[in-house]
Image (spheres, grey):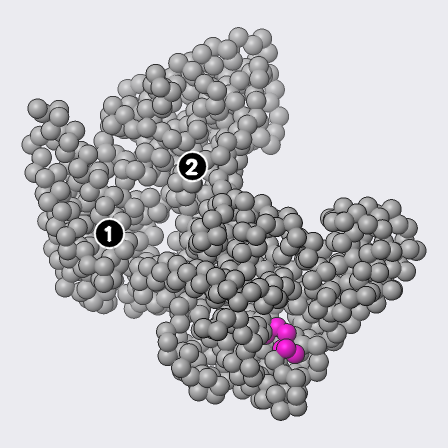
Amino acid sequence: MNNFYNKIIAEDLEQENTKAKLLSQTSTLRSLLQLIAVSMIEFSRETLPEGELNKLSGLVERLCNPTDGLPIEIINTILPSLRSYQDPSLGWGWFKDSNNIKPNLSMQLSDWVAFRNSRAGHGVIDEKIAETWLPKTTHLIRQTLKTFKDFIPNTSKDGILLLSPKLSNYTVDMPIIYRSSPIVISKVECKKGIWKLKGQVLSNKNAEQFVVTLKEDNIFSLREARNPERYTLAEVIVENEDLSFYHNIPNRETETFEGRKKELEKLNEWLNDEDSRMCLIYGDGGYGKTTLVLEFLNRYVEDKLELSLPIPEVLSFHSAKLTRWTEKGLENLQGVANVMDECVRELMRLFMPNLPKDWYQVDGNALIQKAIGYLKQEKYTRDDILLIFDNTETLATDTHEVESLGEFLVAVSKKIGRLIITSRRREFVYATPIPVRELEEGECLNLIKRLAEDCNAIAIQKAGDARLRSICKQLTYKPLLISALVKYIGTTKTSIEEAKQNIFKRSNQELLEFLYEDAWARMNQSQKSVCMTLVAAASPIDQTTVRKACQLTEIPLEEFHKAFDETNFGTTNSYGEQFKIELVNLAEQFFEKQISNLQLAEQKNIREYADEVDKEFEKINTIEAEYKQDRVAEAFRSPFAKAAKIAAEKGNIENAEENYELAICDEPFNSALHDRYAWFLFHKMNDSDRAEELWKKSIELNPNNCDAVVNMALCKYRSNQIDKGDLLIEEARKLGRTFAFCNYNKAKARYYSWIRSSDKQADIDLLNDSFSLLTTATRNNSHKDRYSAKVEEEIRDLFFKVRTQKIKYLQQTA
């Protein structure tokens, strides 16, 4: 690869125009820095401990849309760890001046980035500037090639990319060359779990654009994109204060939202009125009550509303679902209580994603009282909770049921939290009413035109305004009917009159099928089975459940996504390699009806698949829940602590540090908070001295804080104080850590100490001790112990590394 870049430098300088030369050299330096960053991350992923990789997560996420300064940040972040755990001589001249590099390369490249931003990126380059920066840029390329020669791979005879012998001839899997040429990365994205890299060939003659599919296990999976949980932490600014809250609000039901300005204003007024406990949004079917509520709530989450203090700290959305799986197949839930209880349980899943059995052994008022007790324990009041309950009209039909429903709603709103309700009728509750009626004619006209463009409904696009107004009037200005008409015309390419006749002759239930039957008909049986399995399962629809359902029905994941994307059943939210699917309520009802139409044997198959999906989801969540330590909730109680957590996750280090300092002032005796702040300083800011002081304080405040003891031990190990680290790890074992966990960390410390050693023969006992400790840890890792699944995976990974190094060492000394 060095030869590739030297050849490109020569080609760049052959151009006559100075500005053109500078532009070419700039592209070459950009490509080189990206290549080094990618090689460094990939090598780090295989060789550094998991804790060291956490500091890279935000940077790797930003690498999906790379900027010129980003590779410098990546090198600054990961190079100290590589020197500590691998070889102190790596990248010599980057941080400090050397005989050949003055000032240090990091400073020179930072100046280059500043020049790029002020001139090439956002300003003007004249001939004088070009003449000054052309030799500087060429010099920077050559200095970078020398400084990071170990991270610039060579191509073997088989076309494999290998790093230097100093880095164990590590094989680079990322496609950092294309058709034997270096590249510039333009974008990396993941849709439905499939990673793709978009780039350009580094060439003055043919900078070909290309797209390649990456392996599922690529460097971008380092990002902290955990399983999307039922509840998400979001942040808003209210009266100049940064506030956070948890929510499970589904995405909008439509991107073509039109009108409803008055209703949105009324909802906002109610939200800011602390005295009103309930808000009732009511109106006939098809007018868009759910669409209105989800539009409002999504604007809330996106910080697009004028809010007053205080705001709710939890927003919990629940839709009335009248079906569930039993041993007899799909059955209707009977009575109001069974469904209303689920609204309360949905709220409690914020704290316990997999609710214990005792939450299903009580109902009605007993369940409410149990929830109140737990919320008080978590220091939440009834004003901190906002519940949203959709489609309550489905719960009660006769007078007695309606009265029972009203009593339950009143009890929940008074004792647990404020309540937004949607219904087709005026419920018997004291609530702020917001009627949802037909759209205004002008709003309907805008809606039908926007939908026609989105759905490519040619017949609608060709119609004049007068004709469209007439259609809207015939459809009684109902958004649902207008949407159904336009989507049908867009799919079938029929005339307006034929589509209208299809709509007018159908009942509400038939209209539901009309909306989705065409898309359903285009799906094959396996794709249909996946949809029905996901609806029948109780678990959220995310990458875990979808992959399991696809595995059971023997269909590739990509094939399901392709079919699903061609429908209007719902939306897919991508979180990198993770994703979450939100079904439209009507689509969910449609799937349930399809299940009920199956033969009993087929229903049984779907039920069994659904059970397997739920088991898989529960297994994954149990492992995550066990590994997720209790100090998280304890540490992030205050608004400042929550703001610090959010800022750190977004990569805003400066803001995170500031909020951590404020949180410490707010809760000076919170041991868990001190531990988390220390972890942030150690892993995100490389400030081990301040981190160690905070861990000491954390242990002083709570000697039983096992997490702080473990983290302090790891800090000692990092500075090669193995004996002190061992003492702390033994203390952690007394506090509850398993024998396998403790041996694993002792082994890891010894292994990396040997890797860093300048005299590996003299320190061979470190490698042998590491191997012995891992062997013992493997034998004593009980699957019933806490963290066992995660620890076992880490032990296996390190054992492979240690064994490989032992074999290499024995071969070299034989």
Q: Is residue 414 in view?
A: no
Quadrant of the image containing the N terminus: top left
Residue at the (29%, 28%) spot, across then down? 170
Q: Residues within 10 Å of mark 2 (few under 14, many from 20)?
A: few
Q: Nearer the viewer, residue 123 or 283?
A: 283
Residue 88's place in the image compared with 551, above or below, is above
Q: Secondary structure at mark 2?
A: loop
Q: Is residue 203 in view?
A: yes
Q: Farthest residue to the right: give it.
A: 466
Q: Give the magenta part as a residue range.
A: 389-394
Check disc 2 and give the amino acid type: Lys
Disc with the residue nearer the chain's start (2 vs 1)? 2
Check disc 1 and give the amino acid type: Glu
Mark 2 and mark 1 in contact? Answer it, CB < 8 Å.
no
Residue 1's place in the image compared with 743, above or below, is above
Residue at the (29%, 48%) spot, across then down? 51
Indicate whether residue 744 is drawn in magenta. Answer: no
- Residue to which mark 1 is pinned: 792
- Residue to which mark 2 is pinned: 215
CA distance separating discs 2 and 1: 24 Å
Indicate whether residue 390 is drawn in magenta. Answer: yes
Query: In the shown orientation, is residue 191 left or right of residue 216?
Result: right
Query: In the shown orientation, is residue 294 left or right of residue 623?
Result: right
Q: Quadrant of residue 95?
A: top left
